[in-house]
C-alpha cells in the first residue's frame, strides 16, 4: 500500500465524483462534490454546520442514497458495496448512539454481533482492547445512559475500533466535548493515524483538525470549495504588506514599481501582496521616495481567516 | 441446520464475490447471522419493558381464572350464556380447567396479546431509528436485508413466547380452580387429558401464527417512522379498527380480508372431526398478511435513506 498523494483512484481511500444529494423538498444538500482522500492521510472535512458534511458522510457509508454522482470507499462503489466494504470502515456519524438501557460493554457486544465479518470467538478480547484503548474499561459495566458526554463519545470511537480497519470516519468527534475531551480525541486520532489507518474527520472548527490533518476539504453550502494538502491551503494565504502613511498616492506608486500584486488603498493605508520582495527593501524604497512611513507590517492571514474566507462568515451573513 | 446452510450458499455466494470456498463462506455467514440473531433475542428478552409485558400477559389468565371462579363457583358460564357466539368454551370451563387456556387466549387476543406483540414489533426498526442506533447497525454493517430478517425472526419468537406464556400460565389456575381430567370437546366427544393438552398445543400454535402475521404488519409500519410510539399506536389502531369493522354487519363482505377476522377461529380445533376449512382459511390469511407486510417492510427499508 504505497502512498501517492495524487495517485489514481485505487490509491484513494475515498473518491467521489459529482456526488449530489437533493432532498425531497428540492434543497440541494450536497452539490457535485469530488472528494479525493489519499490512503494513509488524515483528512479534515471542514465546513460550517449545515454545509453538507454529514449528508456526504451518510452517502459514503451507504446510509443515504445519492441523487446523482458516484462514490467509492476503499475502491468499492457505494452504496452497492456497503456490506462488502464497511467492515473495514469504522465510523462515528452525527454523535454517539447506543442503547441507553445497556451497559457500555453490552452495547459494544451488540454492535460487534451485528458485524458478519467479526469473529464471535475473539469478541471479548477485541471489545476489551477497544475499551482499554479509549480508557473506558473501568466503566464497561456502567449503563450507557449514565455515561458523561465525553465517555459516550469515547465509546463511539471504541465501537469504530472493534475490528482492524483501513479507514475511520469520524463525524464531529469533538462536538460538545470540553477542551480536555477534545485533546483526548485528538490524541486518539493521532494514534489511529500512526497505525497507518486513513482517518476522515469532519468538524466545523478548523482549529480542531488543523493540528492532526495532512489534508483538508472545505465545504460551503453543499459544495467542496477547497481540497488539498493543508500546506497547500496555507500557501493560498499570500502574505500582504501594509504601509500606513499620509502619502498614500506615492506609497502606492512605489509598491507598483516594485511589482507587488493586488494593491489596495485606504484613507491612510496601502496594502499589496508581498510576493518574493523582502520587506526591508520596500521600506528602503519608500523612504528613498520620500514617503513618510508611520508603520509597515507584513500580515499573513491565519488559517482560521482563510477558512472563514472560504466558508463565509456564517449563516446570518450568508442569508443577509 | 444443514438445509439452512445450503439455502444460504445460494443467497450469499454472489454477494460475497469470493467464490474460492463458498461452502466455508456460507457456514461463516450463517454462524455470524445466528450470533446476531442471538444478540437480538438477548436484547429483546432482557429488556425490562419487554419482561414487564410478558409478566402482564401472564397475570391475565390468573385474574380471569380467579374472576370466573369467584363469579360462578359451580360453573364456568360467567356472564355469557352457552349460546354466546364464538365462546362456547366458556360453558365448558366448569367441567375442565384446560378450557381456561381457550378462554384466556380468546379474551387476550382482543387487545392484550396484540399490545405485547405490537410494542416489540412496532419498536423494532422505529426504536432503533429513534435511538440513532440504526445508523450504527447499518454502518457496522449489519446489512439492511439481514437486519430486517433478524428483526422479523425475533418478532416471531417473541409472538410465540407471549402466546405460550398465556396458554401455559392459564393451565395452572385452570387445573387448580376447575380441575383436570378427560376433556369433553365442544362437539361432545370426550378425549383423554393428554389428547386435550394436544388440542391446547394446536390452538396455541394457531394463535402464534396469527400473532406472527400481526407482527409483520407492525414491523412494516415500524420502517416508516423513527417514532416507536407512533408505530406501536398505529399497529394497535389497525387491530381495533379491524375488530370494529368486523362487528358492523354491513361490512360483512370484507370480513374475510380483515387482519383480525380469523384470529378467534381456533374453536374448530376443539371439535371432532376438526373443521380444517376454516383453519386453512385462517392460516392462509396469516401467511398472506405476513408475506405482504414483510415485503412492504423490505421494500421500504432497503430503499429509504436513514436520516435519524
Image (cartoon, coloured by chain):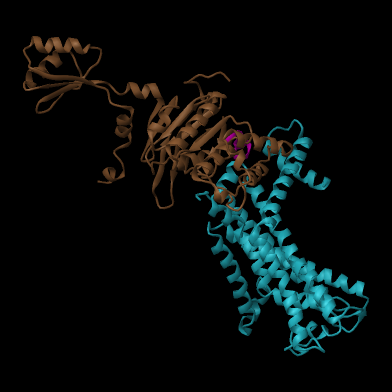
In the image as oriented, which residue stretches furthest toward the front? A138
> Toward which corner of the image does residue B201 lie, by quadrant?
bottom right
From this view, report whether residue B96 is shown above or below residue B281. below
Percent of width and height locating residue B31: 75, 42
> Toward which corner of the image does residue B120 lie, by quadrant?
bottom right
Give the magenta part as a residue range. Answer: A81-89
For the image shown, how many numbered marks are present on the structure?
Answer: 0
Image position of A151 (left or right of B50): left
Asked whether residue A265 is in view, the answer is yes
Q: Main secondary structure of the magenta part?
A: helix
Percent of width and height locating residue A276: 25, 12
Chain coloured cyan: B
From this view, report whether residue A182 is shown above or below residue A2. below
A287 or A33: which is nearer to us?
A287
Chain coloured brown: A
Percent of width and height locating residue A257: 14, 13
Find out whether residue B194 is within the magenta segment.
no
The residue sitting at 38% across, 32% down in the picture is A206
> Toward which corner of the image does residue B172 lie, by quadrant?
bottom right
In the image as oriented, which residue stretches furthest toward the right? B192
The residue sitting at 52% across, 31% down in the picture is A188
Asked whether residue A263 is in view, the answer is no
The residue sitting at 67% across, 35% down in the picture is A126
Amino acid at each position: 500500500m504505497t502512498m501517492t498523494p495524487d495517485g489514481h483512484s485505487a490509491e484513494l481511500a475515498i473518491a467521489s465524483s459529482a456526488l449530489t444529494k437533493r432532498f425531497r423538498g428540492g434543497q440541494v444538500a450536497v452539490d457535485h462534490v469530488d472528494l479525493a482522500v489519499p490512503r494513509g492521510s488524515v483528512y479534515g472535512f471542514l465546513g460550517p454546520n449545515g454545509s453538507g458534511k454529514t449528508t456526504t458522510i451518510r452517502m459514503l457509508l451507504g446510509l443515504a442514497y445519492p441523487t446523482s454522482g458516484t462514490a467509492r470507499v476503499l475502491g468499492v462503489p457505494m452504496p452497492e458495496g456497503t456490506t462488502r466494504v464497511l467492515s473495514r470502515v469504522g465510523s462515528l456519524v452525527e454523535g454517539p448512539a447506543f442503547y441507553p438501557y445497556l451497559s457500555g460493554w453490552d452495547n459494544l457486544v451488540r454492535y460487534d454481533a451485528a458485524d458478519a465479518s467479526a469473529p464471535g470467538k475473539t469478541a471479548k478480547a477485541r471489545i476489551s482492547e477497544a475499551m482499554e484503548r479509549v480508557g473506558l474499561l473501568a466503566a464497561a459495566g456502567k449503563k450507557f445512559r449514565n455515561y458523561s458526554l465525553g465517555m459516550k463519545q469515547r465509546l463511539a470511537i471504541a465501537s469504530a475500533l472493534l475490528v482492524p480497519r483501513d479507514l475511520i470516519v469520524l463525524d464531529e468527534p469533538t462536538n460538545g466535548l470540553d477542551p480536555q475531551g477534545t485533546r483526548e480525541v485528538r490524541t486518539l486520532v493521532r494514534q489511529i493515524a500512526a497505525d497507518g489507518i486513513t482517518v476522515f474527520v469532519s468538524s466545523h472548527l478548523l482549529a480542531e483538525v488543523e493540528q492532526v490533518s495532512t489534508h483538508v476539504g472545505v465545504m460551503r453550502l453543499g459544495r467542496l470549495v477547497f481540497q488539498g494538502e493543508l500546506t497547500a491551503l496555507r500557501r493560498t494565504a499570500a502574505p500582504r504588506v501594509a504601509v500606513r502613511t499620509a502619502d498614500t498616492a506615492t506609497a502606492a506608486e512605489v509598491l507598483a514599481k516594485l511589482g507587488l500584486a493586488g494593491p489596495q488603498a485606504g484613507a491612510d493605508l496601502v496594502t499589496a501582496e508581498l510576493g518574493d520582495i523582502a520587506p526591508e527593501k520596500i521600506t528602503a524604497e519608500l523612504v528613498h521616495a520620500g514617503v513618510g512611513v508611520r508603520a509597515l507590517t507584513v500580515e499573513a492571514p491565519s488559517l482560521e481567516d482563510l477558512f472563514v474566507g472560504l466558508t463565509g462568515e456564517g449563516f446570518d451573513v450568508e442569508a443577509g | 441446520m444443514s438445509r439452512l446452510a445450503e439455502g444460504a450458499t445460494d443467497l450469499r455466494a454472489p454477494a460475497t464475490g469470493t467464490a474460492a470456498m463458498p461452502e466455508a463462506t456460507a457456514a461463516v455467514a450463517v454462524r455470524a447471522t445466528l450470533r446476531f440473531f442471538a444478540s437480538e433475542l438477548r436484547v429483546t428478552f432482557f429488556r425490562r419493558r419487554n419482561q414487564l409485558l410478558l409478566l402482564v400477559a401472564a397475570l391475565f389468565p390468573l385474574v380471569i381464572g380467579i374472576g370466573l371462579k369467584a363469579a360462578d363457583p359451580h360453573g364456568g358460564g360467567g356472564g355469557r350464556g352457552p349460546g354466546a357466539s364464538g365462546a362456547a368454551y366458556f360453558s365448558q370451563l366448569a367441567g375442565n380447567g384446560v378450557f381456561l387456556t381457550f378462554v384466556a387466549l380468546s379474551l387476550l387476543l382482543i387487545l392484550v396479546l396484540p399490545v405485547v406483540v405490537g410494542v416489540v414489533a412496532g419498536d423494532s426498526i422505529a426504536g432503533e431509528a429513534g435511538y440513532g442506533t440504526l445508523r450504527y447497525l447499518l454502518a457496522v454493517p449489519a446489512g439492511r436485508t439481514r437486519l430486517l430478517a433478524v428483526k422479523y425472526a425475533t418478532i416471531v419468537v417473541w409472538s410465540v413466547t407471549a402466546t405460550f406464556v398465556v396458554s401455559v400460565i392459564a393451565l395452572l389456575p385452570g387445573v387448580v380452580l376447575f380441575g383436570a381430567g378427560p376433556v369433553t370437546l365442544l362437539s361432545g366427544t370426550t378425549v383423554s387429558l393428554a389428547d386435550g393438552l394436544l388440542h391446547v398445543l394446536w390452538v396455541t400454535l394457531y394463535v402464534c401464527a396469527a400473532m406472527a402475521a400481526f407482527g409483520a404488519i407492525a414491523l412494516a409500519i415500524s420502517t416508516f417512522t423513527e417514532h416507536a410510539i407512533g408505530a406501536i399506536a398505529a399497529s394497535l389502531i389497525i387491530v381495533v379498527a379491524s375488530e370494529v369493522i368486523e362487528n358492523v354487519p354491513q361490512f360483512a363482505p370484507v370480513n374475510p380480508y380483515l387482519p383480525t377476522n380469523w384470529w378467534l377461529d381456533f374453536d374448530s380445533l376443539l371439535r371432532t372431526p376438526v373443521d380444517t376449512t376454516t383453519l386453512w382459511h385462517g392460516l392462509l390469511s396469516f401467511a398472506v398478511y405476513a408475506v405482504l407486510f414483510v415485503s412492504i417492510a423490505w421494500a421500504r427499508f432497503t430503499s429509504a435513506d436513514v436520516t435519524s
